[in-house]
Image: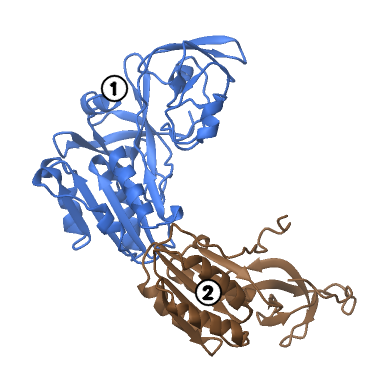
Chain colours: A brown, B blue
Amino acid sequence: MPFPIKSKPNYCLLAADWTGRHHILIGQGAGSEAMLRAARQLVAAAAPVEIHFNSDQADTALIDELKGLSKASSITSVTIYPHARAVLSHLAEILDTARMGSRFYVAGSEAFLWDVTRIAARFGVDPIVIQREATGKDGRNVYCIHCKTTLTNVTTNIVQCPHCHRHLLVRDHFSRFRNAYMGVCADAEVPGERPPVEEIAR
Amino acid sequence: MNNIIPVKVARAEMITPLVRHFTLRAVDGLPLPVFAGGSHVIVSMYADERVIKNPYSLLSDPADTGSYGIAVRLQEASRGGSRYMHEAVRVGDMLEISRPVNLFPLDTLARKHLLIAGGIGITPFMSQIHDLKRRSAAFELHYAVRSLANAPFAQHLLNENPGRVHLYADDQGERLDLDALLGDQPLGTHVYVCGPQGLMNGVRAAAQRSGWEAVSIHSEAFTAPIAGAPYTAVLARTGQEIEIGPEQTLLEAAEAAGIYPNYMCRGGVCGVCETRVLDGQVKHLDHYLSAEDQATHQKMMICVSRAACERIVIDL
C-alpha cells in the first residue's frame, strides 16, 4: 500500500531491464546482497554490465562473490571502492561518458540511493531510469528547516538538532533535492511540551 | 470560442512553392501572449459555408510579443484550410487565433536536445531554437526535406546556427541514418520529432532499438482530420440530430449547430474533447485513447474520430 505522503519514496527489488543497452550497477554497504542478485540476473544480458561497489561496512564474503563475477563474459568490470565517497566521485566520470540506453541499478542505504540519483540528475538522467533498492539499517537524513543543517542516521521521531538545539519532529516528507526528510520544531508553541520519543521504521 | 485573439495579417509571403509564411499582429495593438517554444495556435477561418479551424505552430521568437509567425504548407488533399490560407487570405485581412497552447514543450532538464524535423514539421523547432539559445542549451537540428527548393527556412537556420543544423535533401540522395544518430548520444539527451508519420514512427522505433526510455522521446503530429462517409449524430442531452458531412468533423458539425464542446488541440492528441458514446460504433482516428478504450466504443475524440456506422448517439 503506498504511503499517504506522496513524497515518501517507494523502493523496489532490483530487476533486470532487458530494454537497456548498458547496465550499470552501483552499490554500497548492506546493498551487496541486492547487487549480487541483480548481477546474477544480468549475466544473461547481451549488453555490457559494469559493477561499482563501495565495500565499506559490507560483508566480505559477498564482496568476494561480487569480484568473482568478473569472470563472466558479459560482466565487463567489477570495481570495488574501499572508501565511502569514492564510488560517488567516480560516478560522475561514468555518467559523463555513458550513452543513452544505459540503465542504472542502485542498492544501499536510502541516503546513498538519493546521492546517486542527484548526481545522475546533473547529467540529465531522469530518476525513472534508475532502480533503487534500499537496504541496511541506517536511519534517515533529516533536514532542519530552521538552521538548514542535515542530520544523519536519525532513528527516532523527535531528534535534537546539534547546531541550533531545537527539538525537531521528523516528518515523512522527503526532499529528493536535499536528500533528507523534513525536520520541523516539535515544540514551537509551548517549549518543552513534546510528543514522546519513539523509534521509527525507515 | 475559448479566448480568441483577433489578429491582422501584417505580412504574407511564399517562401517555397508550397509554403506561405504569415506574420500576424494583434488588432488591438496590445502585446500578444508570451509562449514557450513548441506552442501552436488554432486559426479560425470563415470560409463560405463553414468555419475551418486548423492548428499551426508558432515559429517566431517567443520573446517577441509584437507579432507571431506561422507557416502553412498547401496540402494537396486539403479539407480547405490550407487552400484558404493560401488563396483567400490577403495582407491586411483579419483572422482569429486561439491563445497559444503547448503540447510539445522542451524538457528543460535535458543535457542535450536532438531536434528532428521533416518538411513543414520544422515550424515548432524554430521557436524552440530561440528558447534553447537563450538558455545556452546544447542542441542539434536534423532537417529532412524532399528537395532544397522545398526546405522552408533552411538557409536561415543554417546561417543562424552554424555547426548545429544538418540538412538532408531526399532528391540529392541524402539520408538521415536514425540508428546511427540515436545509437550514440550522451546520457540525458532528449529527442523531439515533428513531421510526416513515417519519420515519427522511424524515430520512435530507432530510439527504442537503442534503449531510450519513453520520457526522453517527444513528438508532435500534424494530423489533419481524415474525411469519411457522412453520418448522423444524435445529441442525447437534447435529442437534437446533426448531420456530419464527409469533410467535416463531429466537433465542427456541433459548432455549426450552435453547440460548443470543450476542445484544445483539434488534432486528436490532447484528450480534452473526449465524449461518451451511448450507441453506435466509432472509427477511431485519434492518438489519445488506449487500445482498450477504443475497443469499448464508449468514448470518442470528436475532433478527429468519426462514426463507423450511419447513426451514433453521443452524450452532448
Subunit under mark 1: B
The answer to whether residue B270 is above or below residue A148 is above
Q: Depth check: give the residue in front, B251 or B94.
A: B251
Q: Depth check: give the residue in front, B82 or A42.
A: A42
Q: Residue at x 73, y 74 (%)?
A: A183
Q: Position of residue A40 (x, y in %)?
A: 52, 69
Density class for disc 2 (Cα within 10 Å; few <14, some 14-19, many ≥20) is: many
Subunit under mark 2: A
Same subunit, labels 1 and 2: the answer reads no
Q: Is residue B28 visible?
A: no
Q: Position of residue B55 (x, y in %)?
A: 36, 34
Q: Position of residue B264 (x, y in %)?
A: 47, 34
Q: Amino acid at mark 1?
A: Gly
Q: Is residue B120 visible?
A: yes
Name the residue that disc number 1 marks: B80
The answer to whether residue B218 is above or below residue B86 is below
The answer to whether residue A92 is above or below residue B248 is below
The reply to whether discs 1 and 2 touch (Cβ–Cβ < 8 Å) is no
On-image quarter of the N terminus of chain A:
bottom right
State the mark number for residue A116: 2
Q: Residue at x 30, y 22 (%)?
A: B79
State the SS at label 2: helix
Quarter occupied by residue B43: top left
State the mark number for residue B183: none
Q: Residue furthest bottom?
A: A82
State the SS at label 1: loop
Depth check, mark 1 against mark 2: the one in front is 2
Q: Residue at x 21, y 60 (%)?
A: B161
